[in-house]
Image (cartoon, rainbow, N blue to C red):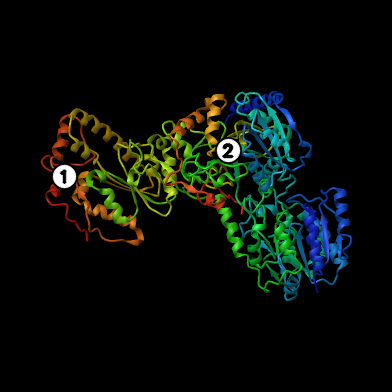
Amino acid sequence: MSVGILMLVHTALDRAEQVIRHWNAGGCPVVVHVDRNVARDTYDRFVDALSDLADVHFCKRHRCEWGTWGIVAASLSAAETMLARHPGLGHVYLASGSCLPLRPVRELTAYLDARRATDFIESATTADVPWTVGGLDAERFVLRFPFSWRRHRFLFDRWVEIQRRLRLKRKIPEGIVPHMGSQWWCLTRRTLEAILTDPNRAEHDAYFRRVWIPDESYFQTLARHHSTRIESRSLTLSKFDFQGKPHIFYDDHLQLLRRSDCFVARKIWPHADRLYAAFLDPSEQAMKGAEPNPGKIDRIFAKAVERRTRGRPGLYMQSRHPHDGWGNGFTSAPYSVFEGFEELFVGFEGWLARLTGGRVHGHLFGPEGAEFVGRQPTYAGALSSHPAIRDYNADRFLTSLIWNTRGERQMFQFGPRDSQMISWNLARDANAQISVISGAWAVPLFQAGGDFGALRTEAARLQKIESEHLKHLRSPHAKARIRIWTMAEFLEAPMEGLQAIIDEIAGARRLKRLTEAPKMVDLTGFGQFLQNLKNQGMHPYLMGDFPVDGAPAREDKPLRKPYLVR
Amino acid sequence: MGAWQSYRLRLQRKRWRIRAFRKRRELRPVARRTDTIRPGAILVFSTFRNEAVRLPHFLGYYREIGVDHFLMVDNDSDDGGREYLASQPDVSLWTTGASYKRARFGVDWLNWLLLKYGHGHWALTVDPDELFVYPFCDTRPVRALTDWLDASSIRSFSAMLLDMYPKGGINDVPYEPGQDPLEIASWFDAGNYSIYRNSRYGNLWIQGGPRMRAFFADEPWRAPALNKIPLVKWDRQYAYVSSTHTLLPRGLNQVYDEWGGEKASGLLLHTKFLSTFGSKAREEIERGQHYAASREYRAYAEGLTDNPDLWCKWSEKYINWRQLEILGLMSKGNWA
């Protein structure tokens, strides 16, 4: 018993010839179908080149266009020729000219000999497997497709639409349950013979001639009808990308293919010299009689499809520039924004860095430039701290920073003195953790002192900017994790607020309880300062209610000592 | 986009093609071997002036990745580069003494050669100081890429310009002919690029890198554009609009995904910042033949007097294309 090879060829005839010789040397008869689109003289040369081989035959030629009946007709002609000439075969294997056997032929024959009654053909009902690209699954069996999908896409689509609207449906022949699967199969001679000699074959052929992509359904359906035992998988390793076109194998896939233990792989790049040399080498050692295991290759190609369709979130580059909101996230990793903390606590940045171990920057969007940690002139990815460069594209500045520092949490200060271009995107970014002590911008003004008229103007400006920013944070579109306290609220229990933020940053790591409190600035007289602003007609409302005399009650206690929440 | 704008872009494209046709008379053939170009050959188109020192490595690099033929325009070189190229069996060479600026920085000349010889071929349009890097370029020839692009019905392939620079002063290590410039200029900026979408042509406008942070910090919008589409399955209806930044018809500029996915892309390693740079900048300022009145070169020259070191603590050292892929500067897309 042996296996016969049907080979469909349309390009790279030199490679096909090599593979045919390989099959033939392994003792397999081969029937070759050459696409009618191949020029006559090229075909003749090809036939000539193979004329020294005894068991290689050529069958009637058909014109093969993708997705049409031609490919099935070619397979049928080749199968008829094969069965007529070699009635004693065990199995018949359908392959293409760009298929490459990965294991010695004797291993394949041994494998098939051990499974004499088994048909290897991927075959599933359309209802169960949503494989198809383009959405036509069940409909490919009941609509008519007179127009070429490749050449007349517009007509193809319109005609499908019209049939849907008018509910035009073809009748499926009796006894036929449509199945689909990979085009490359290996059937027993018995099953193949049954398909070819079926009394209803004329009816079947007439029906499938008008089905869309019949090469994925003709044998898959009829094998179900005739076979006694189907293994629904293809012995040919063939992966498809998101557009339904086969992935191609190159020289650098050599090891991967070797370890896959598959019998045949498709599609091989015709110029992959190393692959052809390695796998067609007659001294090629037997693998180990293992079952095919394409797991690793599957993963690589699945990843490629994912990269093409989803990409790397938070990355903006020359070939990935998602529309607003379509990028699976504005940034690539979580980060924290602190507003008003630096104003309220002395040495807040250093304290936060010690506690969390993350990178704590100053005001990244400050008017004098980006205050990177350590006040460096450049930072990760060679980001410049220059304010004009940063403001030229503030969105990309932030997304680049987060992308460049993957694996290391970034934290920075923000406030109404800073460039506000980023405000809206911050609020909408699910990766942002934003903590705001509103009104704390008044503290530096209070400390600075000086001309009160100028202070009043500045306070009015900052309050307006911050209230605009808070509006963004409170918008229903905001997706960031946002905490907002008025300054008065926060001062009532400062450690509680800090603890909550730090816990969230630590996440599952759940680090230490706060033992070291940051030192708060001296707020004596701040209430009076606010009252003075009010007296000048400028109402500072963002900081909440402060008593005029002295600071809020908490101020009396020494805040230097840690206030432990638990 | 409305029909009206569509029509205007069409007129514009025709104008560039007519202009290229007129400018053809400025080109005088030195060595024409275009009859050796076979169907399906991969072609390099390039224009240069006084680059003799770079040409040996340039040709070697592109031959190595599998380019079949070079079509080059020499703009009045006097350093022997023309004679060198004329003797190469796979180079077709034209020469011109006409104004580089009035040929729109060489685009008209190349548009003409592309129109005449590029039709139906994959055409790679690069300068002598640009090295094309694409996914798997260390294991697969460029034909593997173009075959895959053909199979995927992709007509144009993006490769952003990545400025490479040495560590230390530009003049510290002299560059020798034939040497791999990346041995000296092996550093780059990994992640400081600004990207905007140009609504008129549909392409991305990318700026940044060492040139922006060193020379254009006060006027970042004037920094040179880095987006490029150098590899195109050429058709005689196509035209480059400005350098290889922009193409018409505008569908060719759609080299990026807008719904979150990544398309495949490569990079052009730009090895301009070598010891040869100072004299080049001085010469170009005198000729005033470069973009926006040689503003770029002037900014460099001013910077160079202080001997700028483009290197910074956060510069990244070039290893291979996989490193660039991981950094997110290029992508494999769904090519695996």
Q: Pointer 1: residues within 10 angstroms few (<14), some, or many (20+)? A: some
- The residue under the point 53% across, 45% down is B184
Residue at far bottom of view? A114
B292 sits left or right of B232 in the view: left
Instruction: Identify the residue position indicated by label 2 in the image.
Output: B228
- The residue under the point 15% across, 33% down is A532
Report the front residue among A342 and B132: B132
- Total numbered labels: 2
Could you tell me which secondary element the residue under label 1 belongs to? loop
* Chain ID at mark 1: A
| Residue B101, image quadrant | top right
**Cα gap from disc 1 to disc 2, whole angstroms:** 56 Å
| Residue A121, image quadrant | bottom right
Q: Are marks 1 and 2 in contact (CB under 8 Å)?
A: no
A305 sits left or right of A324 in the view: right
Tell me if I can see residue A166 in this picture.
no
**Mark 2: amino acid:** Lys
Instruction: Identify the residue position indicated by label 1 in the image.
Output: A522
> For the residues tagged 1 and 2, is the chain the same?
no
Q: Residue A544: horizontal and vertical position, in percent? A: 21, 42
Q: Pointer 2: residues within 10 angstroms few (<14), some, or many (20+)? A: many
A410 sits left or right of B46 in the view: left
The relative height of residue A297 versus residue B224 in the rendered view (above or below) is below
